[in-house]
Amino acid sequence: MNSQCVTAAALLGVVLTISGCNSAQSDWTKAANENTVFAYQNFLTAHPKDEHYMEAQAKILQLQDDNGWIEAQHTGTTAAYQTYIQQFPQGSHAAAAHDAMTSMDRAAAWKAAQSGGTATAIEAFLQKYPTGPEAEQAKTKLKDLTGYRVRLASVSSDDKAERKLTQLKARLGDQLHDLMVTPDANRKSFFIDSGGMTEQGATHACESIKRKHLSCQVVHL
């Protein structure tokens, strides 16, 4: 092969290389502008050794992550968020998916606690979900359910209070549960109180006790 042929072949190689580079760059620009999984996959198929290969793969993974998150939000169920987390455990929206599931579980638990309508149900809810928008509602509800007591006596010492407590338990234990000694802040007075209840419940109980010719009053905690 003479020198002219060698030169021509070299020039042809350069032209083809430049043409290939221009084609890859053009395809990359097109894929980036479209910014879809399909476009990036086409680019990878056409240019498996291009410098943008790793970037294209990363773009595909991020788009799949984002599309999965959009679908989970559109469906809006615990199962949908769980599916997203299973598919993308390290996804950019994983924390938000966990938060959404927790929020839905908390809302369902609060609805169930309200249906139960008891202080025990509300307390169980607060123990599991001490924070969140429903927690303040639960605390208010708990105060309504347990914010009142029936006060049966007031004495001046702890010993007298314990003796009085024993007497009142024997007489009223079947009517008032959870009788207790409650000292004041300075421990100079000791009260015999019932357990917490609603205002209506405390009022009704006190009226019943007065009919037995015993003294009592309704106190608000």
Image (cartoon, rainbow, N blue to C red):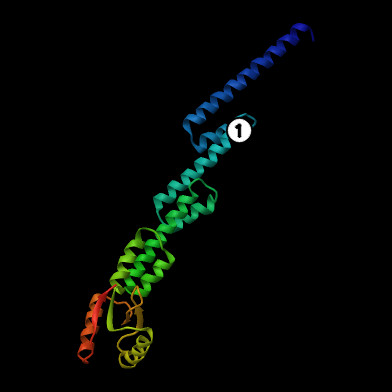
Image-quadrant location for residue 17: top right
Image-quadrant location for residue 170: bottom left
Residue 211 appears left or right of 192: left
Q: Residues within 10 Å of mark 1 (few under 14, many from 20)?
A: some
Residue 166 or residue 1, whichever sits in front: 166
Number of labels in the image equals 1
Residue 56 or residue 105, whichever sits in front: 105
Q: Which residue is mark 1?
A: 53
- Is 124 placed above or below 170 here? above
Q: Amino acid at mark 1?
A: Tyr
| Figure quadrant of the C terminus | bottom left
Q: Position of residue 220 (x, y in %)?
A: 26, 73
Q: Position of residue 158 (x, y in %)?
A: 38, 84
- Is 162 placed above or below 129 here? below
- Is 122 placed above or below 169 here? above
- Which element type, helix, strand or loop, lies under badge 1? helix
| Figure quadrant of the N terminus | top right
Residue 107 or residue 143, whichever sits in front: 143
Seen at 41% across and 50% down, the residue is 73
Q: Position of residue 59 (x, y in %)?
A: 53, 37
- Is 55 placed above or below 24 here? below
Residue 9 or residue 47, whichever sits in front: 47
Q: Position of residue 187 (x, y in %)?
A: 36, 77
Seen at 51% across and 38% down, the residue is 37
Image-quadrant location for residue 215: bottom left
